[in-house]
């Protein structure tokens, strides 16, 4: 894990020339080969390829005004007016350095910007990110007041960024994700019978509460210690690492979070560290001890049910998750049929969830043995 304690603050405007993209009407272009970058958060921001000459050279970083999702652009490209373009002005940017900086921007900025608070060109010029600072042979910071990378004269350690990404991307047995992530289950052909699965109310399986409901503009990251979970579909829902907040209790590691609304409605994750939540996020705590594999099984079913039965900005989860939200689960059976619980802890019909079967389904999946 990277130790960022000694990193320094750098303003993006001191590192890059920042400009906005140019909007083209649909009748101004046809299909072609030039990437057309939009504010999309997927596919490196490329919405389509068009037949216009590029407006911007490659070896640049782009961010969308909504979400401030950053991508490194290797090819020359066109970009809509909803995109900000970052071109290195005081240093030579390489693909490795570009990817390193985009990762830092995404980690520190994505959760701060939305449709209601867009990251425009002038906003981009005020963004400050933390980067490693260059040191001399004695371990002291190299200073270059004239370059004005930083008010204190610190200089970003571009060589560290280059070398760090090279290690991650290097295709060898010790460092390649593709080579080290192996599974014994790759040839397993698992057949899952669901005909005897039964329906359970989610609130019978978990204690469900609303999260903290902390707005991002009320958070700080001067001495960050706590994960900040929002309505997102990536990064386990964690969109920031923030300071402890007076008067706010953290939720414990192991609890599950569910996005109750928005574009990523139903995104359900297991939180590995203590956390706070943003608005419209529910927290689920198991009523009996469950393994991470069983929780992963249930989180997948929650996401699936939301895709089928609920609708962002329409039929959202707020009024349903603690009332009538249901999922179907495998249940315990013996030679006489269904095993029933007279106390009806998990089901009004007395069915008992087969937690062990859920766990084995996940662990037997390809790469399930690597979780």
Image (spheres, grey):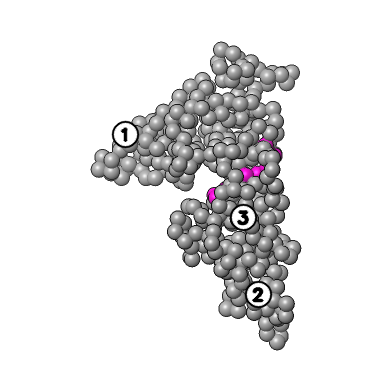
Q: Residue at x 70, y 47 (%)?
A: 249
Disc ID at residue 210: 3
Q: Is 26 in the magenta? A: no
Residue 109, image x and y in percent? 55, 37
In the picture, measured across the screen, residue 76 lies left or right of residue 136, that is left
Which region shows up in magenta?
224-232
- Horizontally, residue 70 falls left or right of residue 33, namely right
Packing grade of label 1 (10 A; few <14, some 14-19, many >=20) is few
**Which quadrant does the N terminus fall into?**
top right
Give the residue at mark 1.
53
Q: Label 1 near label 2: C-beta < 8 Å? A: no
Query: Is 304 in front, or is 102?
Result: 304
**Screen quadrant of the C terminus:** bottom right
Separation (CA) of disc 2 from disc 3: 23 Å
Badge 1 element:
loop
For mark 3, give the secondary structure. strand
Q: Which residue is mark 2?
A: 347
Q: Residue at x 59, y 71 (%)?
A: 328
State whether residue 10 appears in this view: yes
Residue at (47% x, 30% y) in the render: 123
Q: Which mark is residue 363?
A: none
Residue at far top of view: 146
Which one is in front in this view, the residue at disc 2 or the one at disc 1?
Answer: 2
At a point 62% along the width and 52% down the height, the residue shown is 211
Percent position of residue 316, x then y: 49, 59
Name of the residue lying farthest toward the front: 247
Rounded to the nearest whole Å, what is the CA distance between mark 1 and mark 3? Answer: 51 Å
């Amino acid at each position: 894990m990277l130790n960022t304690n000694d990193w320094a603050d750098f303003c993006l405007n001191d590192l890059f020339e920042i400009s906005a993209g140019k909007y083209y009407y649909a009748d101004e272009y046809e299909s072609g080969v030039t990437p057309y970058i939009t504010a999309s958060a997927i596919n490196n921001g490329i919405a389509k390829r068009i037949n216009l000459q590029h407006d911007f050279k490659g070896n640049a970083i782009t961010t969308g005004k909504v979400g401030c999702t950053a991508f490194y652009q290797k090819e020359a490209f066109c970009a809509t007016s909803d995109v900000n373009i970052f071109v290195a002005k005081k240093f030579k940017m390489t693909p490795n350095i570009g990817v390193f900086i985009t990762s830092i921007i995404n980690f520190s900025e994505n959760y701060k910007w939305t449709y209601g608070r867009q990251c425009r060109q002038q906003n981009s010029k005020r963004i400050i990110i933390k980067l490693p600072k260059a040191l001399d042979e004695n371990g002291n910071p190299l200073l270059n007041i004239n370059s004005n990378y930083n008010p204190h004269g610190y200089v970003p350690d571009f060589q560290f960024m280059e070398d760090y990404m090279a290690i991650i991307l290097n295709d060898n047995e010790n460092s390649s994700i593709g080579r080290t992530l192996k599974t014994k289950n790759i040839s397993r052909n698992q057949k899952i019978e669901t005909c005897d699965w039964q329906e359970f109310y989610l609130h019978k399986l978990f204690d469900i509460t609303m999260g903290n409901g902390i707005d991002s503009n009320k958070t700080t990251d001067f001495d960050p210690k706590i994960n900040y979970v929002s309505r997102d579909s990536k990064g386990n829902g964690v969109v920031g690492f923030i300071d402890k907040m007076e008067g706010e209790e953290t939720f414990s590691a192991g609890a599950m979070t569910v996005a109750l609304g928005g574009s990523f409605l139903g995104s359900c994750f297991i939180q590995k560290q203590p956390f706070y939540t943003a608005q419209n996020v529910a927290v689920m705590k198991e009523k009996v001890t469950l393994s991470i594999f069983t929780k992963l099984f249930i989180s997948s079913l929650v996401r699936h049910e939301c895709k089928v039965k609920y609708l962002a900005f329409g039929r959202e989860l707020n009024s349903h998750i603690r009332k009538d939200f249901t999922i179907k689960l495998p249940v315990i059976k013996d030679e006489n049929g269904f095993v029933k619980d007279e106390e009806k802890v998990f089901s009004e019909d007395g069915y008992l969830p087969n937690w062990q079967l859920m766990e084995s389904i996940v662990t037997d999946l390809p790469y399930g043995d690597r979780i």
